[in-house]
Amino acid sequence: SYEVTQPPSVSVSPGQTASITCSGDKLGDKYACWYQQKPGQSPVLVIYEDNKRPSGISERFSGSNSGNTATLTISGTQAMDEADYYCQAWDSSTVVFGGGTKLSVL
Amino acid sequence: EVQLLESGGGLVQPGGSLRLSCAASGFTFSSYAMSWVRQAPGKGLEWVSGISGSGGSTYYADSVKGRFTISRDNSKNTLYLQMNSLRAEDTALYYCAKVPLDYGDRRNFFDPWGQGTLVTVSS
């Protein structure tokens, strides 16, 4: 079965750019999306179709997907961005999530 | 505003059954596929099951195939998950989520999510 892999944790200083990767075999041939989940809250979609932002999501969030890696980039990272982030891909009517990345804003 | 409200969770013994419900509002329920996603305590997200808008097509993760059944009642705007032969590893917060495109569309994603209902399988 298809799998995607994320680093367990990423740290970033306030105001800097954070990059969270999601790796899978030929992931670039699929579409990747990203969810943000803060403690005690439900996941929220922040990027879909590799690089599209839903209404209401800050322009600081962007995405890319090529080769074997999708990347979520958060520019000008703020304390409020501290959360768990999950990538997701759709594979033959089944769904694959990455294991999640805890973003720490230090 | 789209709203999804899950219910039906609780404590159940191993081998037992439980039926979850997800009441939807704010959109034309029958026009959209839906899905269940779960999250074990302190763990990541795991897709469980999905269903087409008409209910005619259903999809399951290998971990629940043969034990769980997804269904929907479009007249009641409600999604269900019948869970049988429950195991300790099924303990999780179960979310329902709206699927914006035809279920087989690889551009798909989940938006929005409900608040979840907790299922605990323990003796």
Image: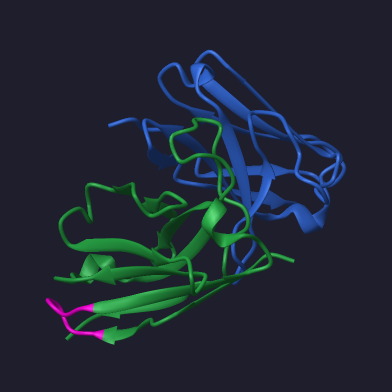
Colour-to-chain, blue: A
- Residue A92 is situated, as x and y percent measured from the top left of the image, at 36, 30
Residue stretch in magenta: B12-17
Q: Kindly tell me whether residue A79 is visible in this rendering.
A: yes
Can you say whether A91 is above or below A55 in the image?
above
Q: Residue furthest top?
A: A67
Question: Residue at position x 83%, y 51% from top?
Answer: A56
Q: Quadrant of residue B20?
A: bottom left
Q: Is residue B15 magenta?
A: yes
Question: Residue at position x 52%, y 70% from top?
Answer: B77
Question: Residue at position x 43%, y 70% from top?
Answer: B93
Can you say whether A67 is above or below A85 in the image?
above
Q: Kindly tell me whether residue A5 is visible in this rendering.
A: no
The answer to whether residue A79 is left or right of residue A48 is: right
Residue nearer the viewer, B74 or B83: B74
Residue nearer the viewer, A71 or B15: B15
Q: Quadrant of residue A16?
A: top right
Q: Quadrant of the C terminus of chain B?
A: bottom left
Colour-to-chain, green: B
Residue nearer the viewer, A101 or B97: B97
Q: Quadrant of residue B118?
A: bottom left
Q: Main secondary structure of the magenta part?
A: loop
Q: Residue furthest front?
A: B75
Can you say whether B112 is above or below A101 in the image?
below
